Amino acid sequence: MRVHHEPIAEIDRYIANEKKYVLADKLPSYERYLRYIRMVHPVDTTTRILEIGTGTGWFPLLCKANGIPCRGLEISPQLIAVAMETGRQNGIDPDIHLGNIEDNDIGIETYDVIVASSVFEHVEHWREGLKKAYAALKPGGAFFFESTNKFCIRSAEYPLLFYGWMPDKMRYRFRIRKHGPDVMKLGIDFNQFRYPLLRQAFREVGFRRILDVVDLADPASLPGWKRSVVSLSRKNGLFKHLVLTFYTATSFVCVK
């Protein structure tokens, strides 16, 4: 996808929804990201992090507030403006640059950690983006990936039951009717992923260790029934496959 400098209605809708949150509201998500990453890689003030698709910028803002260097790459000038304003309100100057993962040079063996949450569903040529992310990681570096899961019952992309189950072209037509043609510029989910598809793609690009959301879960922090689901998933491969098929998102941490 290319950078669009004009206002995009879909981005306006996203910003209007996000304005109900303050930076402190994002702390649980920030801490979850770091908890997952720290299972495979230390994170401290010397760790070089890149976030692909910063959205409203809360992750690089919270990183900087905690002394952790984090560079951001964001395709939407509107979202960068929101991140900069949030930074001004909180006395933080975020390091966020305009561009997309498909075209931008993000370097070779440059980063210790790369974060890509709720972004690769919007990357039309996602396999090329994945190759670039892999190349930009240092050996032993960690890649945190979170995106759509095709067969979840209610997708975070659109509040309609079985939305992700639609064939791609049908889903595009549906969103264009709902939100207008601008949704295809920024905002459309080109991709509805599946755990087996992503696991294979991560393996093919070269990641040597691949942890999914069951592997990353901390049973001690979960309520009883969720703890039981994780425990059984770790013992029974077929049950794990069933759980991951319908889980709300695809979540992985991969090690180069």
Image (spheres, rainbow, N blue to C red):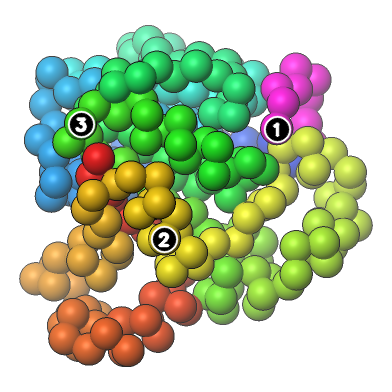
**Residue 25 shows in the view:** no
Q: Secondary structure at mark 2?
A: helix
Position of residue 6 in the picture relative to residue 84 (left or right): right
Q: Secondary structure at mark 1?
A: loop
Position of residue 88 in the picture relative to residue 102 (left or right): left
Main SS class of the magenta portion in the image: loop
Q: CA distance from mark 3 to mark 1?
A: 29 Å
Which of 12 and 229 lies nearest the eye of the viewer?
229
Kind of residue at disc 2: Gln
> Is 239 above or below relative to 135?
below
- Where is mark 3, residue-wise? 139
Residue shown at 29% from the left, 18% from the top = 110
> Is 250 above or below relative to 142?
below
Q: Position of residue 28 (x, y in %)?
A: 27, 48
Q: Are marks 3 and 1 in contact (CB under 8 Å)?
A: no
> Is 254 above or below relative to 128?
below
Q: Position of residue 112 (x, y in %)?
A: 22, 27
Kind of residue at disc 3: Pro
Q: CA distance from mark 2 to mark 3?
A: 20 Å
User: Which of the labelled discs sits on residue 1, or is there none?
Assistant: 1
For marks 2 and 3, the one nearer the N-term is 3
- Where is mark 2, residue-wise? 200
For marks 1 and 2, the one nearer the N-term is 1
Q: Position of residue 161 (x, y in %)?
A: 66, 77
Residue 3 included in the magenta stretch of the image: yes
Which of 58 and 106 lies nearest the eye of the viewer?
106
**Which region shows up in magenta?**
1-9
Quadrant of the image for the C terminus?
A: top left
User: Which of the labelled discs sits on residue 116, or is there none?
Assistant: none
Residue shown at 75% from the left, 69% from the top = 167
**The quadrant where residue 155 appears:** bottom right
Position of residue 242 in the picture relative to residue 165 (left or right): left
